[in-house]
Structures are given as C-alpha cells and as structure tokens.
C-alpha cells in the first residue's frame, strides 16, 4: 500500500500534542495528529473542576520534578505563562487567578480545547480520531505508521500520548513502550498528585472523612502549606496531593496542623483560659471533629490548669509534626499526573528530539518532567509542545 506523506505525525491529541501540531502546522508543515479517543483534549475538559487551571504565574523550573531538574529550563523559558495568556486573550477567553498564581477560565475548559482545535485548523493540521496506533516502522530516516485502513509516513514523529494516570480517560503506557522500542530509557513511573492511603491503625482519622484544614505537609525536604482533607481511605487535599509527588513508599508524611502558631502557644492558652480543655483550645484553630480526634490521640484529659507545661510543650511539638505513615496511594486510577516517564537524558532540551533517533520527539506528560499542582503541568505541555512544534 502506498503511504500518505506528512512532514510530521503527532501521536496523542492532548494539550501537548495539539499545541505541537498547531505550531508546526502554522510554520507550514504538513501535520497529522492521531488519537485513539473519539475527541481531543479529554484531560483538559475535566481539568481544574471543568475550568482548566491552564497555567501558573510562578511556573519556574524548580516547581517541576525530574531526574534532571535542568531539562525543563530551556522550553519553559522560551514559552512562558505570559505567552499562553496572550493566546487565551486573542481568543477572548476570560480568566482569573484563583490562588497561588493559578489561572482558570471564568467559563469552561471547553474554551481551551476549542481554542487549540482552531489553532490546529489554522495550521491545516489533519486530525485522525478513534485511531489506535500499535506500532511504528522506522527505516531510511522515515517513520511509517499503519492504523485502520491507512498507512502514513513522515520523517518526524512526536510522542505525545501522555502518562498512565486515569486509564478510564484513555490514558496508556504506550509512550513508554514506543520510547523503549527506540532505545530510550524510562524513569520509573509513579502515580503523583494522588491521595495517600492510611492503614487501619490510623483509623481514627478515617472517621474524619470530609474534614479539611490548612496545614504544612512535608516529606523529606519538600513542604507545602495548603489545605489537607481527610478521606475515608486516608489523606487528600492540595497539600497532600503536592507532597504525594515527592513521597516514596515507606516514608512518613509530617503534618503541621497549626502552621504559624508561636512556640509556647499552648502554655499561653493555659494561662489565659486555665479551665478550658485541650479539645476546646484546639477547636479555636481547627474544625471541631479534628480538634476532638487530635485531643483524644494526645490523651491529655481535663482542664489545662491541671496539665504540666512540659506535657503541653510535647503536645505542641506533636501537633506541629504529626507523623502519618501512609501505606500507599490511590494509584494511577486517581493520580492527576505521573512522575517519571521517558528519561530526559536521551532527549534534546531544545527540540525534545531523541538524541540517537533523528526525527523522534517526546513531549508533555510522557516525558520525565512533572509539575506541581496548580497549572504547572499544562504549562509544561504547552512549552514542550511548542519546542517540538518549532523543530519538526
Ligand atoms: C482530573 C485531572 C485534573 C487535572 N487538572 C489539571 C489542571 O487544572 N492544571 C494542570 O496544569 N494540569 C492538570 N492535570 C494534569 C494535566 O491534565 C496533564 O498533565 C496534561 O493533560 C498532560 O498533557 P499531555 O498532552 O502530555 O497528555 P494527555 O492530555 O494525557 O494526552 C494524551 C493523549 O494521547 C492519547 N493516547 C494515549 N495512548 C494512545 C495510543 N496508544 N494511541 C493513540 N492515542 C493515545 C490519549 O487519548 C490522549 O488524548 C489534571 C489531570 C487530571 C487527571
């Protein structure tokens, strides 16, 4: 069968693939964008609670995890949050900053998908949906792909099929299989931005399902001050999702339940309100049910006046460094992203091209670059997509 020829074939019509295809198409390249899903940008549609947290004003490279923290620097510097905001504004999409530099659509994530589709149209990109790619042949500097009844060929292929998080949305480990087949290494993929689960011994906390409070959660050297949420299986909320990307099985997660409390605050409370019980004092700063559970665990019954200062100091220490021992995560089924992926060591940070396989590129979540919660992952999808789109 004679093959149809393109300048580049982009595999995966998520944020990274659509951006890459649009940029390359608008440079005059003949681009085919292929996805096995029946519509593009499914993760964009459900992102940010349906409003897509499309970037973060503070998208500096130190907010991304990677075996090589320098890899993302170049692409992020060449396509910045301001560049994406410029694009969003050209499409009259209203947006707002929610918190911590996180930018959301006022209306709907559908606007971002429609914008990217139109950008692809402007670049004359051909989109083939509902097409599962199984394998790629590579010979004489050309990639040949068969899907459905078609065979297509190009000197460049871009792997933009994402990571395995949320398989029910069509996510697969295909990017890794393909990368391995071309000799690229994979940094062990782990679920990230994912709720942590607690064992039965910490069951007291399961009973707090639905309770949320601002904390500082830390694991190793990483620490995040945001809300934490107790769930029926363990811990969630932004602070926990953030720390989950850094957490390794077997490690503890420390939670400061009273961030910003001055040392000696419990002794001071004892002097100011000696008749109060610990539970009552904690409930001034924390949700009632949490205050009750923590007081119960600290086992300091009775009025503060009857508790020695030393024990209050111990309680303060414990409250500021409550040690949880998560027994796992809720896995790829619930993970917003994947940490790890195609090793950056085999890729050019300028063009996202495989150093040893001319014409092969990898972008977006498929690559071992993972952002914090809050718009960082889309910024990486856009920036890496643009970098490859300018190169193919
Ligand atoms: C619930 C949820 C909410 C999120 N919210 C945010 C947010 O608000 N802000 C933020 O920055 N990030 C958010 N993220 C993360 C963000 O969605 C991803 O980091 C981003 O979508 C990655 O883009 P991508 O293009 O690399 O991959 P994807 O968006 O995963 O796109 C990959 C595409 O490849 C296709 N594909 C996979 N395998 C094959 C195959 N074998 N053949 C053909 N096609 C294939 C898939 O169908 C998909 O369309 C969220 C993630 C989830 C799950």
Image (spheres, rainbow, N blue to C red):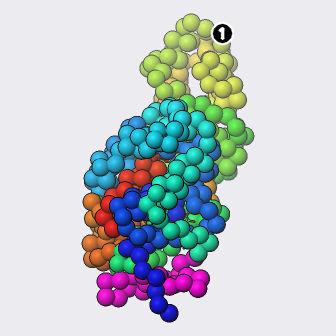
- In the rendered image, residue 147 lying in the magenta stretch gets the answer yes
Q: Is residue 240 visible?
A: no
In the shown orientation, is residue 167 left or right of residue 377? right
Viewer-side residue, 357 vs 85: 85
Total labels: the figure holds: 1
Viewer-side residue, 60 vs 127: 127
Residue, x 52% and y 26% (percent of image)? 258
Examine the rendered structure and indicate whether residue 69 appears above or below residue 389. Answer: above
User: Residue 230: image x %, image y %?
Assistant: 65, 40
Return the residue found at the far top: 272
Find residue 392 and report its image quarter: bottom left
User: Residue 77: image x %, image y %?
Assistant: 29, 47
Which secondary structure lies at badge 1?
loop
Disc 1 under 8 Å from ligand 1? The reply is: no
Residue, x 69% and y 25% (percent of image)? 288
Q: Mark 1 points at which residue?
A: 275
Viewer-side residue, 372 vs 303: 372
Residue, x 40% and y 37% (percent of image)? 57
Q: Can residue 146 be seen in this view?
A: yes
- The magenta segment is 132-153
Return the residue found at the far bottom: 1
User: Residue 161: image x %, image y %?
Assistant: 49, 67
In the shown orientation, is residue 390 left or right of residue 14? left
Residue, x 32% and y 74% (percent of image)? 359
Helix, strand or loop: magenta stretch: strand
- In the rendered image, residue 208 lying in the magenta stretch gets the answer no
């Amino acid at each position: 069968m004679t093959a149809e020829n393109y300048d580049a074939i982009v595999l995966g019509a998520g944020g990274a693939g659509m951006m890459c295809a649009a940029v390359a198409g608008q440079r005059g390249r003949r681009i085919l964008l292929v996805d096995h899903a029946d519509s593009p940008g499914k993760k964009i549609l459900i992102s940010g609670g349906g409003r897509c947290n499309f970037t973060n004003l503070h998208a500096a490279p130190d907010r991304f995890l990677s075996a090589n923290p320098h890899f993302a620097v170049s692409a992020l510097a060449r396509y910045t949050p301001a560049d994406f905001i410029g694009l969003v504004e050209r499409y009259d999409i209203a947006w707002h900053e929610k918190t911590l530099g996180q930018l959301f659509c006022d209306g709907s994530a559908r606007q971002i998908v429609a914008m990217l589709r139109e950008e692809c149209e402007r670049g004359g990109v051909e989109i083939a949906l509902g097409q599962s790619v199984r394998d790629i042949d590579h010979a004489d500097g050309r990639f040949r792909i068969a899907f459905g009844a078609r065979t297509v060929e190009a000197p460049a292929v871009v792997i933009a099929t994402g990571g395995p998080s949320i398989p029910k949305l069509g996510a697969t480990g295909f990017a890794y299989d393909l990368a391995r087949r071309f000799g690229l290494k994979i940094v062990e993929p782990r679920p990230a931005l994912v709720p942590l689960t607690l064992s039965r011994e910490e069951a007291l906390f399961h009973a707090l399902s639905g309770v949320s409070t601002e904390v500082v959660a830390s694991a190793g050297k990483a620490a995040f001050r945001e809300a934490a949420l107790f769930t029926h299986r363990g811990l969630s909320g932004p602070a926990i999702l953030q720390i989950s990307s850094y957490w390794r099985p077997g490690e503890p997660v420390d939670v400061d339940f009273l961030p910003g409390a001055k040392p000696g605050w419990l002794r001071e409370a004892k002097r100011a309100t000696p008749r109060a019980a610990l539970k009552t004092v904690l409930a001034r700063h924390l949700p009632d049910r949490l205050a009750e559970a923590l007081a119960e665990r600290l086992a300091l019954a009775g009025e503060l006046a009857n508790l020695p200062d030393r024990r209050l100091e111990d309680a303060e220490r414990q409250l500021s460094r409550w040690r949880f021992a998560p027994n796992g995560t809720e896995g790829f089924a619930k993970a917003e992203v994947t940490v790890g992926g195609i090793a950056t060591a085999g890729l050019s940070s300028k063009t996202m091209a495989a150093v040893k396989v001319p014409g092969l590129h990898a972008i977006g979540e498929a690559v071992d670059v993972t952002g914090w919660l809050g718009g960082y992952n889309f910024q990486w999808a856009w920036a890496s997509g643009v970098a490859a789109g300018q190169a193919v």
